[in-house]
Image: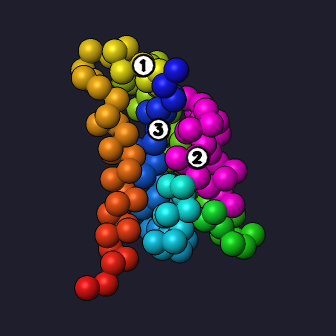
Amino acid sequence: MPAIVPDWLDPLREQLLPALLQAGLDIDTRTRLNIEAWLHAAQERALLSPDPICARGALRAIVSKSAREQQLFDQVFDAWRKRWDHAAEVLGEVKTLTKPEATPNRASAAPAASRARGPIRALVAGLVVV
C-alpha cells in the first residue's frame, strides 16, 4: 500500500516555513534538512494524517529553541493552519491521496515523490562549494 501524501505538505514548505522565517525564527539550511528528514520518515511510517496538526510537535521541536520561539511558532502555525483549513474547505474535503489512480489529474505518484525530494536536492546543491 502506498504511503499517504497529505495535501498540506507543499503549503507547509511554501507558506509556513517562509512565514516562520518572516516572524523571526532561524530557519537555516540545517533546520530545513531536519524538517525534510522528519517529514520523509514520518510519511514512510504513515504517521502523517490529513490534518497538519500531526506535524506540529515535531516541527516545533526542530524550529524552536526557546520559550519565546515556541510561543512565536505556535502563533504562526495556528494562523497558517486556519488559512489552510479555510482553503481546504473552499476546495473540498479531499485532503489526502492514497492511490495515484484515485485522482484523474495525477498520472503517477512519481511526480509527488520527486516534488518531496526537490527541496532536499536544492538545499544539498546549495551546500556544495565549487
Q: Residue at x 33, y 78 (%)?
A: 128
Return the residue nearer the eye: 36 or 57: 36
Q: Is residue 106 visible?
A: yes
Amino acid type assigned to the residue bearing label 2 in the image: Ala
Amino acid type assigned to the residue bearing label 1 in the image: Lys
Q: Residue at x 42, y 52 (%)?
A: 13
Give the residue number, with chain letter if any, for mark 1. 99
Which label lies toward us, 3 or 1? 1
Q: Is residue 15 visible?
A: no
Q: Which mark is residue 8?
A: 3
Crowd around label 1: few <14 · some 14–19 · many ≥20 (10 Å): some
Q: Position of residue 24 (x, y in %)?
A: 52, 73
Q: Position of residue 77 (x, y in %)?
A: 57, 51
Amino acid type assigned to the residue bearing label 3 in the image: Trp
Q: Are marks 2 and 1 in contact (CB under 8 Å)?
A: no
- Mark 2 and mark 1: Cα distance apart in space: 19 Å
74 in relation to 83, above or below: below
Q: Residue at x 27, y 15 (%)?
A: 104
Magenta stretch mostly in which secondary structure? helix
Q: Point out the tag, 3 or 1, that comes first from the N-terminus.
A: 3
64 in relation to 78, above or below: below
Q: Which mark is residue 41?
A: 2
Q: How many marks?
A: 3
Return the residue nearer the eye: 103 or 113: 113
Question: Which contiguous range is marked in magenta?
Answer: 38-61
- Mark 3 and mark 2: Cα distance apart in space: 16 Å
